[in-house]
Amino acid sequence: HSGTTGADAVQAEFDIIRRVTGPGVIEALDLVRGTDGKPSMIVFDWVDGGPLHVWRRSNVPDMDRVLSIAQQITVVLDRLHRERLVHRAIAPEYVWLDPSSDRVYLVHYSEARSLGASTAARALPDDLFPIARSGAYLAPEQTGHVERGIDGRTDLYAFGATLFFLLTGQPPFEEEDN
């Protein structure tokens, strides 16, 4: 990703969101351009609620709500993976919950990557937006501890870790530096 700019990243995220629009994805209404004509910001539709990890601090969901949340996330993951995209950043802070309607949205597509024609996406050290979230939700291939490319299983691992958090209020593992 050498030579990638912030404008390129904003454009890429906008394009991905438009590509997978539907239930569970907050609609990208517009792409705002700076005075230089380059993309600078995405304008999203308004959605009530907030990040799952904030809601979970003061709520213990019953099994029906857990299953509803899980089902809604899988709908988005299915759409992403059918488009040969990997989200790469599934974690409680990127699952948005509107408690009044029980609608769930997967947000933060700046980490998403295309799988290409036949190869798995690779996490590159010079990615413009390094993953700045808890390592407790990273799949082993995202940590550099295993030599395997990133693919749809990466998202499924993080999805499982997110469900663990939803059920217990704790990440599945304590973070370690090594």
Image (tube, rainbow, N blue to C red):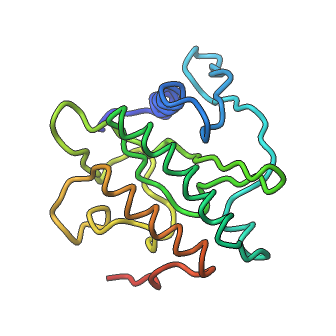
Going by the image, does 174 lie left or right of 145? right
* Farthest-out residue, right: 100
In the image, what residue occupies the spot 52% across and 67% down? 162
Which quarter of the rendering shows the C terminus? bottom left
* Farthest-out residue, front: 64
| Residue 143: quarter of image | bottom left
Which quarter of the rendering shows the N terminus? top left
Q: Where's residue 134, x and y in %?
A: 50, 70
Q: Nearer the viewer, residue 46 or 9?
A: 46
**Does residue 124 sit above or below 176 in this rendering?**
above
Q: Where's residue 122, x and y in %?
A: 24, 49
Going by the image, does 138 lie left or right of 7? left
In the image, what residue occupies the spot 58% across and 47% down? 106
In the image, what residue occupies the spot 47% across and 85% down? 174
Q: Where's residue 72, x and y in %?
A: 58, 49
Task: Tell how many labels.
Answer: 0
**Does residue 122 sit above or below 17 in this rendering?**
below
**Does residue 112 sit above or below 160 in this rendering?**
above
Q: Where's residue 168, x and y in %?
A: 60, 81
In the image, what residue occupies the spot 16% across and 40% down? 119
Q: Nearer the viewer, residue 114 or 2?
A: 114
